Amino acid sequence: MKILYYDCFAGISGDMNLGALIDLGVDANYLTTELEKLNIEGFHLEIRTDQRRGITGTKAEVVIENQENEKHRHLRHVEEIVNNSSLPEQVKINALKIFDLIAVAEAKVHNISKQAVHFHEVGALDSIADIVGAAICLDYLNVDKVMSSPIQLGGGTVSCAHGIMPVPAPATAEIVKNIPVKTGLVNHEATTPTGAAILVATVDEFTDQINLPITKTAYGIGNRDSEVPNVLRVHLLEDAKVVQDVGTEEATLLESNIDDMNPEHYDFILEQLFRAGASDAWLLPIIMKKSRPAIQLSVLCKAELADKLKAIIFVHSTSIGIREYRVRKNVLRREETNLETTYGPVRIKQSFYGGKLVHSKPEFDDCKKLAEANQLSLSEIEEAIRKQLEK
């Protein structure tokens, strides 16, 4: 298991988050290339090594190339930019979730609908890059879980588009409701609305307890130079024992709802899909519009086989549309051994987790051959194998 842990002892902002995740291992060139998929001009990302109070980390800054061309946007404008991009679907989902959290908070503070919220700082190019960049980085790191310490909010007042506000800013206070926080470490805004929303949208668990080995630590450098280092610290936690037994694989999931095909044809389609390299394929009964019974055909495969398998579905079924998702598979370490029995050899499939054997199963085709050769039932063969494995 691989966990991203945010140590927000000095707060978090959008640019500090980008710097910390780049420092942790996100490829800066990859991030820049992915941000270009937003198809908006007028900004670029500057990345450099910097220090605060002797702590070295990465400073990531979104530079606006011409402030006169900058404009404020409503939520729908931001949604259009993200949805019209060619970014991966999960990146879009995470980015829009962050924007929505901020819009809901601003709407409540100003007593208006979220679509009527006029984004100020958050609708600017630098904030769009910070938020979408956060989603890109998280997707790149491909962690199993995101955790965070309680969030340091700071103290004093902050100057924003609406004037001088107390810390935390009203929108930040709304976003962090029901989230563990701390205040007063510094006399300035330690956590911005963007930083708070990134955490609330992506963190699975808030805790100040770390119970797994820290394999890497990184720092995102902020803009201030105060007595408390203005840095965001992040850790990568890994359970080495579990990691050696659990592999992560990227795969593609294809889905199609079919309600007008001869059921006898499904067996043929599944046979063709497996023959073409599908990792798995299955049928699920569903009810569609007008209470019409149907079948959902699902196919799991390697990304490079997706087009080939989609062609099989279109040619050999009545489907006129296929949904395609990128998924992550967590796969146990597997081994295959040969077992000599009194009835003949049989292959045994074994699975391991946490350094321990958790599953052991004889190959069905081998059991079938032994049953036929020895004129016994499958149950008798499987029982004999089970007893031998228990010895």
Image (cartoon, grey):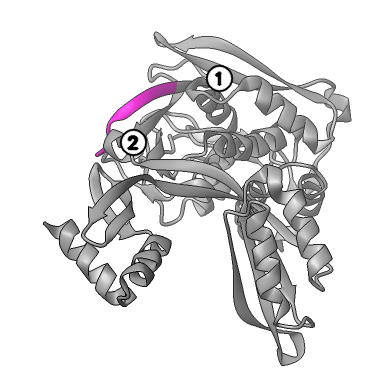
* Quadrant position of residue 113: bottom right
Q: Residues within 10 Å of mark 1 (few under 14, many from 20)?
A: few
Classify 317 as above or below 57.
Answer: below
Instruction: Provide the residue span drawn in magenta.
Output: 211-218
Residue positioned 70% across, 82% down in the render: 263
Hey, what amino acid is under mark 1?
Answer: Asn
Name the disc covering residue 223, or none: 1
> Which residue matches tag 2?
244
Residue extending furthest toward the right: 69
Q: CA distance from mark 1 to mark 2?
A: 40 Å
Percent coordinates x, y for residue 158 in the rendering: 56, 34
* Quadrant position of residue 152: top left
Q: Are marks 1 and 2 in contact (CB under 8 Å)?
A: no
Percent coordinates x, y for residue 55 in the rendering: 40, 12
- Using residue 68 as the reference point, say whether residue 127 is left or right of it: left
Q: Residues within 10 Å of mark 2 (few under 14, many from 20)?
A: some
Nearest the eye: 133 or 284: 284
Percent coordinates x, y for residue 133 in the rendering: 65, 34
Residue positioned 77% across, 50% down in the render: 307
- Where disc 2 sits, the SS reads loop
Whether residue 107 is visible here, answered yes or no, is no
